[in-house]
Amino acid sequence: ITRYSGLVEHYRARLPLTADTRAISLAEGRTPLIKLENLAREIGFEGELYVKFEGLNPTGSFKDRGMTVAVTQAVHEGARAIICASTGNTSAAAAAYAARAGITAFVLIPEGKIALGKLAQAVVHGAVVVQIRGNFDDGMRLVKEVAETSPVAIVNSINPFRLQGQKTAAFEIVEALGRAPDYHCIPVGNAGNISAHWIGYSEVSGFETAANVLTAELRGYDRSKLVDNRPKMVGYQAAGSAPFMRGGPVRDPETVATAIRIGDPQSWDLAWAVQKESGGWFDECADADILAVQRRLAELDGVFCEPASATSLCGAIRDIKAGRIAPGSTVVCTLTGNGLKDPDIIVKGGLQGVVEVPAERSAVEKALLARLG
Ligand code: F0G
């Protein structure tokens, strides 16, 4: 038996790292692909509906995939500090991997707009947390400015090593299904992850993305001989924070799904290329619908994801019902982060099922009978 020790070791040959680069890893990856039997039945879907539960990565989100590769490379290049702007998950991952590497993490977060669990993660791992009186887009701008003159490596998804790490989720899905799904539904904020998945699916099926089509020709790829089994990539945004639906930046993005509260996505061009190449689409979901799906998934199939993550499933369910996603197809929805990061959102929605009784046998039995009938 060989011990699984994370993405960098497992996929090193398919990552742009030299053979001698020391991996900074927390054994991330290998997340479960869970078939949603109950939810699929409820909506009358006869295809196969899966969630890739990225919330089971070491820091509770997909960011670990990108962070292990970005921090591995940054340390290899001699970096002693990393920096990012974040709606919470990137900062949690940056903090943890920096701790592991013995370097400093600086994280810029929008004041009062990140889930408490994520802030706690950045703090417990010893990051320097800078709360800015602005939103994620302000933070991103500031990070780029500061990194010009300070000795810090940016680990936001504008760092290409991030997307290289995140492409491995697509590898795992193809390994698990034996083929790519017909549709891949994913929440879109900065649009790095949708782009990374497309790179991954394209690599496993022998296709080159627009970004490296030139080198493909140099290496003698004959595109006409390839069978395109890549999925349609479907990106869902929160309605109050949906620049891909508005056709340009949104000034004051607002959504309960704070992880994707982003008005000016950094991977704008890449994501549009993904939409066109894959034949997929973008759409938006209302906050109330996102929260309802987050709860329904937890109640019916036992998976607790954070609100931003539920956006993918929320959109997928609607497009399945509308017939836009073909009946009988295989659909994978990425659940980007763990629900435990943001328990507040559930508490605010009301603690249904919580009953308070005296500490007496009869009172407890009465509570049971009230439910069992
Ligand atoms: N879902 C969650 C839970 C996220 O944290 C993010 C991004 C996304 C979806 C969107 O992914 O940006 O690649 O399109 N969170 C970043 C952060 C911005 O700072 O943690 P994307």
Image (cartoon, grey):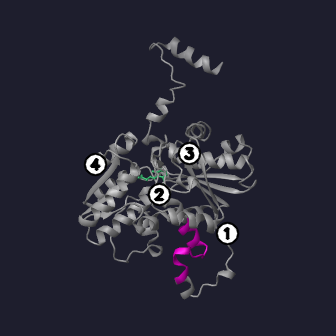
Instruction: State the residue in front, 56 or 364.
Output: 56
Can residue 178 be seen here? The reply is: no
The answer to whether the residue bearing label 2 lies less than 8 angstroms from the nearest atom of ligand 1 is yes
Contact, CB < 8 Å: mark 1 with mark 3? no
In the rendered view, does 329 fall on the left or right side of 255? right
* Residue marked by disc 2: 265
How crowded is the residue under tag 1: few (<14 C-alpha within 10 Å), some, or many (20+)? some
Secondary structure found at label 2: loop
Residue shown at 51% from the left, 19% from the top: 355
Position in image of residue 312 (x %, y %):
58, 50
Q: Label 3's element? A: helix
Horizontal side of 313 relative to 254 (left or right) equals right
Q: Count the labels in the image.
A: 4
- Which numbered disc covers residue 229? 1
Relative height, residue 73 to residue 223 (above, below): above
Mark found first going from the N terminus, 3 or 2 = 3
| Residue 154 is a magenta residue | no
Q: Give the residue at mark 4.
A: 129
Q: Amino acid at mark 1?
A: Asn
- In terms of secondary structure, what is the magenta stretch mainly? helix
Viewer-side residue, 157 vs 45: 157
Q: Residues within 10 Å of mark 2 (few under 14, many from 20)?
A: many
Residue 292 visible in the current orientation: yes
| Pointer 3 with pointer 4, Cβ within 8 A | no
Which amino acid type is shown beneath numbered disc 4? Val
Magenta residue span? 198-214
> Residue at label 3?
239
Position in image of residue 94 (x %, y %): 34, 56
Give the mark nearer the N terminus: 1 vs 3.
Answer: 1
**Which marked residue is nearer to the observer: mark 3 or mark 4?**
3
